[in-house]
Amino acid sequence: MTQRNCSTSSSRLHARDYQKLESEKWHYPLAAAFAFAALAMMPATARAQSSGGSQPNLTGPQVSRVQTTKPAEVENYWTAERLLNAKPFDIQPALGSDGRPMAAAQVPAVTGNAVKSKGAPPSAPAEARQSKVLISQSDLQAHQAEVQAFNAASPVIPESFSPIGATFTTSRVFPANATTNYPYSTVGALFWTDPADNSNWFCSASVLRLRVVATAGHCVASPATSTRAAHFHTNFVFIPGWRNGTAPFGTYTARWATTTATWFYSNGSVPNAQDVGLLVMNDRNGYKIGQYTGYLGYWTNQLSSNNVTMLGFPCNLDSCELLEANYAQTFEYGGNNTYIFGSNFGGGSSGGPYIRDFGVKASGSLATEGGNWLVGVNSYGPVNLGYLYSGASNLNSEFLNLLSYACSAAGTGGC
């Protein structure tokens, strides 16, 4: 069984310690999950109607849940204390003796035609942004001092290559204001609650369509082979451009969540063949989130041989408060339609995008360069154990069906 990691401290920031992280088994108290079971077992047509969208033409099952809590209540829920104390969500594969992931059930790698669609830069005027300070500087400084003291007591500084041979380069995104410029602006912090025990968690995510945000399936729902135990998370708030407790584009709540059946009805182990989740976000002041931040393109079946830019908020780097970039080439097949890349991204980076041809297109460059294609989302990695790599599911037809389903729920102009 795959384990999820969290620090014994109430603060997510203590997850920086590679050696002292403790694990707890996936747990799904049935009483807390019964409320979600009926919707999870609804047929696809009924689920789509309940979300206010028409039923798309699907070739496989998806699962979804309407987020019923009012946006203002969700925003009020996320106080500075809760934001600081949300734990980084991090699931790890079972490892072989050589440190490589072991898949519980093997699924062959995706083959066939690749499908892609372009992204776009922001279209809303800059003055329409509503920046927020979510954590005061005094609270943030006190928290960072606590983290620094903790790290000084137990320093672990790994080399910039994996023991299995995967190489990478990791860097804080700089200069500071770059995170509000496209395409960095599409990436943000995702906070949510697990209703099974009312615990608060933290992931990374990115804007994929005008109203749609992409992340890992495990950041959207807790799976189980029993439909009574599998359930969706709640209180989603996405903060694009998250930096030191500020929200330069404001905060965005979700009105609808979906993930693949491959994840939702699994036993929670990784590698998982399609650990992907999507959220449909509420608009703010008449603008869709993608109009403020821009949105990424996507390209399926691209992980087998590629160079990617990974972005996210790993809590082993800069206390989860700054956007980090990891640059790596496909290292090898990770099993179950996943591929692994050298990486120093720890807990908190789950759901962050893997992007092909990242950046601004230069004059005279190749046709796909600057396309900012999402080719995967961060799914797993044993970084805290010293094996420096991360893995992602290779986007396939199930992802395309999922996106079609989400675009239906997003309504007119949502994609």
Image (cartoon, rainbow, N blue to C red):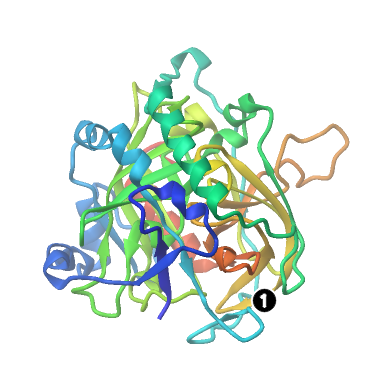
Q: In which quarter of the image is residue 283?
A: top left
Q: Quadrant of residue 294?
A: top right
Which quarter of the image is occupied by the C terminus? top left
- Residue 287 placement, left or right of 381: left
Residue under label 1, please give it. Answer: 333
- Residue 384 placement, left or right of 339: left
- Residue 351, can we see it? no
- Residue 13 placement, left or right of 77: right
Which quarter of the image is occupied by the N terminus? bottom left
Q: Where does the image place residue 329, in percent across and percent down from the top left?
A: 75, 61
Q: Secondary structure under badge 1?
A: strand
Q: Nearer the viewer, residue 211 or 91?
A: 91
Q: Residue at x 20, y 60 (%)?
A: 197
Badge 1 amino acid: Tyr
Crowdedness of circle 1 by 10 Å Cα count: few (<14), some, many (20+)? some
Q: Which residue is drawn at 44% across and 45% down?
A: 213
Q: Residue at x 48, y 35 (%)?
A: 145
Which residue ends up furthest to the front in the rendered image? 153
Q: Where does the image place residue 93, in percent across and percent down from the top left?
A: 51, 75
Q: Where does the image place residue 129, in percent across and percent down from the top left?
A: 45, 19
